[in-house]
Image (spheres, grey):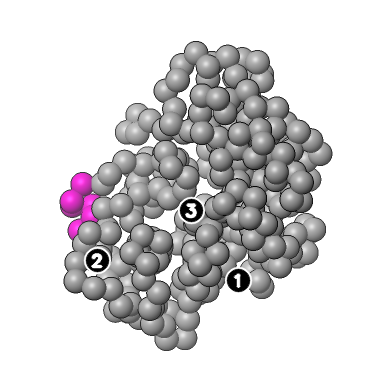
Amino acid sequence: MAAMPTTAYIMLGERCRSNCSFCTQRRENPHSDRLSRVVWPEYGERELIDALHHDRIFARVCLQTLDYDGMVEDSIRIAGQLSDIYPVSVSMVPVDEDDMRRLKDAGVEYLSIALDAANPEIFTRIKGKGAGNRFTWEGHWRALRTSVEVFGKGNTHLIVGLGESDEDIIGVMLELRDMGVQTALFAYTPVNWGNPPDIRRYRVIQLARYLIYDSGISDFHFRDGKLTGFEAGGDAVESAARKAFMTSGCPGCNRPFYNERPGKELYNYPFVPDMKIVEKGVSDAMDYIAL
Ligand code: SF4
């Protein structure tokens, strides 16, 4: 392996009742054993818990639940058996405050509620009413605010390449940062429609995410929604770049090859990239800004 996963990623649930149009687990694709481009072999609960107790090779356990009756109870039961030895994250559709508190009481450290889309129109089309789901843009933001109140911090996912502008996605990350919500970036993996994002654009959005969250930068310039520059002092870009191109998410998450095929240029590096990769990434990002 080029990179071992540093987190144990566990998908919970047999069938998803939702139908997000970018997702291999959507209701209208009932036979898939994949999420993104990754296959998820099946294990029994006892076997899984015993193995995780026996081989403590992971920095974190991440429960990624489908949307189904019992997702909260299953997460509480499993988190409760693991949270004494691992930090546990849960990624779930919005649930009410009581359920969030029960998850926290079971030892869940991070609750991630994925916005995925960076503007309300795209959200409604791919994840809301347009996809046959009950989710709304406002409801997801409400749940993110509640999760910050309950957990003291929040977490979300944004997918680059769903048709959003740079201004949409950077504006959303600025708002999320100010609310106390971290962003994990994903590159759109075509499973149903469309194309993956241009790597130069992905590099610039990764750089912007890092500068927003880790350098506290807020001044970005746009023309017709496209990023044309930002205000960052001295060597901010050079010092950011090594970490900026790595997988973003909870501490200890590296998600190897989740968005990309081995052998191609990686969107998210599951390890610290070498200087050649960093220099190309910065050069690609600057080329994109100059377009
Ligand atoms: S709720 Fe989650 S698992 Fe279900 S279709 Fe949407 S993104 Fe996929």
Highlighted range, magenta: 274-280
| Residue plotted at (75% across, 44% down) | 99
| Residue plotted at (36% across, 42% down) | 270
| Residue plotted at (55% across, 25% down) | 84
Front tag of 3 and 2: 2
- Quadrant of the image for the C terminus? bottom left
Q: Main secondary structure of the magenta part?
A: helix
| Residue plotted at (38% across, 30% down) | 4
Q: Name the residue tied to disc 2.
A: 236
| Image location (x, y in percent) of residue 92 | 66, 46
| Image location (x, y in percent) of residue 31 | 71, 36
**Label at residue 184:** 3
Ligand 1 contact, mark 3 (Cβ < 8 Å): no
First-in-chain label (3 vs 2): 3
The amino acid marked with disc number 2 is: Ala
SS type, badge 2: helix
Within-10-Å neighbours for mark 2: few <14, some 14–19, many 20+: few
The answer to whether one can see residue 278 in this image is yes
